[in-house]
Image: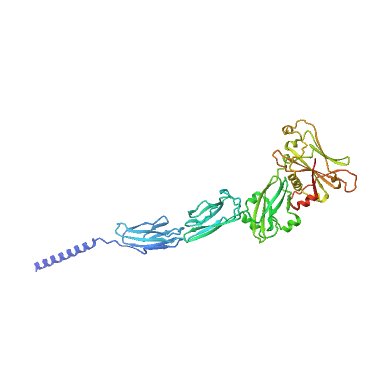
Amino acid sequence: MKKFFWNLMTIVMVGLMSAALNSCGKDDEPVSPTLSVDETAVSFNSNGGTTSIGVVSNTSWSVSGGDNWLSVSKSTNSITLIAQRNESTEEKTTSVTVRTDDGSLSQAIKVTVAGAEQILELSGLDAPFAKEANGQAHAQELTITCNASWVIEGKPDWLSISNMSGTGDKIIKVWPTGTNNSTERRATFIVKSGIKSITKEVVQHGISSCYAHPVDVVTLTESSVWGYEFSNNIHHVYFTLIPELEANGLTNSDIEKATSNNVDDNTWVRRTPEQFREYGNYFSWYGLPTNKKYMLISVAYDNNNEIGEINRMAITTKVDDLYNSPYIDGDYISASLDVIDDQFVYRIRSTKDAVHSAYADKFYSWAVVGTSEFKTLLCTDAQIAFLISQEIKKNPAPHDTYINDTDRNKIRERLEGPVQEANYTLPANLLNDAYLQVVNWCILPSGEFSGKISWYWFDLMVSRGVDRKATLMPKKQESKTPKLIQFNPQQLKQEYKVIKLN
């Protein structure tokens, strides 16, 4: 019995120990790592975006990969992906890898951002090139807005383009390679990018069949005169005289837009051939500021109301100083009109202190006769100068000068000298007219005419049946507010006779 008990106890103990050993062996067996992700592919539209992907694992893990346009961050049980906007039209693709720290398991996640919608836009290069435009100095800018590569095709031979291809946004320059001495020329070129393309037209003015050209321009210190020569098919002309800086800011497209309404306004004057025939095709703008740069812009329209040539002419009023003035009055020069032996004799006397004469080579002296005081008052200095310039064209021979001393340096130094006098006998036909201007216009050492004419206005008192005498009248004052006069040169010549004094 006792032996049986011990045997039984031995069997129990062995069983318990075996069970214990078996139990200890199971707890020490290694656990296999696991790793899974919620998504293995993520897609964004071209705007990019943010997304989170869950990660399940029974061990530690890390994340790697991506690109400069994709940021990746890790939290306890997920990763966050932030994709930037894709400005390119090409799709962007990269991958992110989640891996257990022991490297035994990994999951790749493909990330895609769609390409942006293709953009191709052009702006600028809208104004026609002038026919004189030649070289890069006359270039216009063309702005290309694009989010991909682009190329220009079909460029005409007479056009130069600074960049024929590129990628992304770019401002390029376009210019004609030569003056257009033919008729207007038009051409197109194409800007291509991917499946998109835009055709751009370029125009360079040529010798237009419809034109209005300023001619016979005479400009003094405060007034200017010009006329128009125009084509037979002209329907109307617009013109304006504006400061040069303002004119430089006007493109031909701006000018065409401003003159397309067929009416006069505060800036543009509109005239038709009928109005030219009735009132004359010459104009005088007076009351202008001195020493100022202007631009005379003339725009011709044909009988179909299509715009023709746009003409720009620079006009600068002269400086108002002694250098630009004959200065035939004041203390230095005296003038008189005397009746001697039934003839009118015009006298000019130069005193020893005639400082003004240092600025002039010679003076042109002319008699300008008017039959009406009212009409005389309407005539501007520039119109008188215009009449004289027309006579000079007919007879360009040098005129007499009453300043005989050619050494102007001595005069500048105001050295003592004799009083000089010139007497001019006026033609007998002046006795039948009522008003007389004796005009002096000096030639500067540069060969240019002075900016002022100096003149005396005499009332002859002859046609009124009064005894012959000549009364010196005060000079009229021109308006200080810019005003425009339209006139016919032939009528002006009839109203004002211009006669050279000999």
The spot of residue 312 in percent (x, y) is: 65, 51
**How many callouts does the rendering have?**
0
Rendered image quadrant of residue 290: top right
Q: Is residue 416 left or right of residue 192?
A: right
| Pick the front one: 453 or 268 | 453
| Pick the front one: 438 or 489 | 489
Q: Is residue 178 above or below residue 47?
A: above
The spot of residue 83 in percent (x, y) is: 43, 59
Which quadrant of the rendered structure holds the C terminus? top right
The spot of residue 428 in percent (x, y) is: 85, 44
The spot of residue 373 in percent (x, y) is: 83, 49
| Pick the front one: 368 or 24 | 368
Rendered image quadrant of residue 353: top right
Extreme residue toward the top, this view: 416
Q: Is residue 358 above or below residue 199?
A: above
Q: Is residue 495 left or right of residue 187?
A: right
Which quadrant of the rendered structure holds the N terminus? bottom left
Look at 48% across and 54% down and name the residue there: 165
The scheme the figure's colours follow is: rainbow
Extreme residue toward the bottom, this view: 1
Q: Is residue 257 left or right of residue 119?
A: right
Look at 71% across and 48% down and name the residue there: 217
Q: Is residue 12 left or right of residue 153?
A: left
